[in-house]
Image (spheres, rainbow, N blue to C red):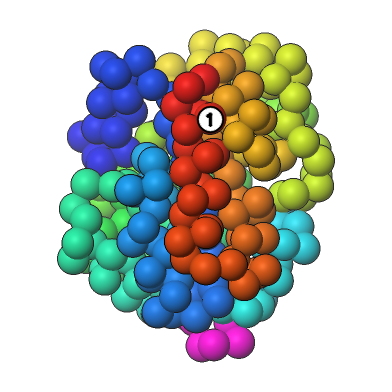
Amino acid sequence: MTRIDAKFAELAAQGKKAFVSYVMAGDPDFDRSLEIVRGLPAAGVDIIELGLPFTDPMADGPTIQMAGQRALDVGMTLKRTLELAAAFRKEDDTTPIVLMGYYNPIYSMGVPAFLVAAKAAGIDGLIIVDLPPEEDTELCIPAQEAGLNFIRLATPTTDDARLTRVAENTSGFVYYVSITGITGAAEAQADDVSPAVERIRKATGLPVVVGFGVNTPEKSRAIAAVADGVVVGSAIVSQIAAGKSTDDILAFVKTLSDGAHSG
């Protein structure tokens, strides 16, 4: 059982939904990013999604793109991202960390070397948005064999046939993209999300966490009520971009987690 599996089992026993927060590793710099990440669990975050800075993102809207560029500008790399995760693990051995990004930096490092380094750094799962199921032998299956969850995205355009394919080697949870578009582009609607979540649960048997378009405590509560958890990214990254203090950022995160947990 991975930390992700254990966290969902713990939350289910408590009758709670998961709150997942996304931050870009190294935004606005290494030390400040680590400070924010270290404060997330106390702010109610159940699972941390740690963004891997990359020059050519495809699914990310302007807010996340600019966060990635800020991180790259201060020298963040895949190696430095794993160093940040390892530094977090020195103080927290229980909160799951999911590395979210694109395959190119991993390919450049080499899959075997990456998996060894990711395990050593305390990474629990991967969301690699540009590797479809047809490429499972590339990273997905080796990652699962190394003890990492490989988490897939499902979208409003994923039909039943494709969902069966998506589910084959997915573990940990399914990330449901609630809108057709990029991150931060529109708001998720609970009435639209609910039937999709039920369909994915039946097809996979896995928890379904909803992201893209959750940006307020009220929205967090509404989406959590119809899913197994919610992800908030752009709204948190916007606070970092605005130069808010760490305390203010974490206080904002706490409002979002309280919303999800009350859902």
Residue 111 x, y percent position in the rendering? 38, 66
98 relative to 228, above or below: below
Q: Quadrant of residue 73?
A: bottom right
2 relative to 25, above or below: above
Q: Is residue 126 left or right of residue 7?
A: right
Quadrant holding the N terminus: top left
Residue 43 x, y percent position in the rendering? 40, 47
79 relative to 220, above or below: below
Which structural element holds mark 1?
A: helix
Residue shown at the point (19%, 62%) measured from the top left: 91
Front residue (pair 190, 144)? 190
Counting labels gives 1
Residue shown at the point (58%, 25%) measured from the top left: 221
- For residue 74: magenta? yes
Residue shown at the point (38%, 21%) measured from the top left: 16
**Residue 34 visible, this orientation:** yes
Front residue (pair 107, 187)? 187
Span of residues in magenta: 72-78
Residue 146 x, y percent position in the rendering? 26, 52
Amino acid type of disc 1? Gly
Q: Is residue 221 left or right of residue 181?
A: left
Q: Which residue is mark 1?
A: 259
97 relative to 208, above or below: below
- For residue 189: magenta? no
Front residue (pair 242, 18)? 242
Q: Is residue 224 left or right of residue 158?
A: left
Residue 100 x, y percent position in the rendering? 51, 56
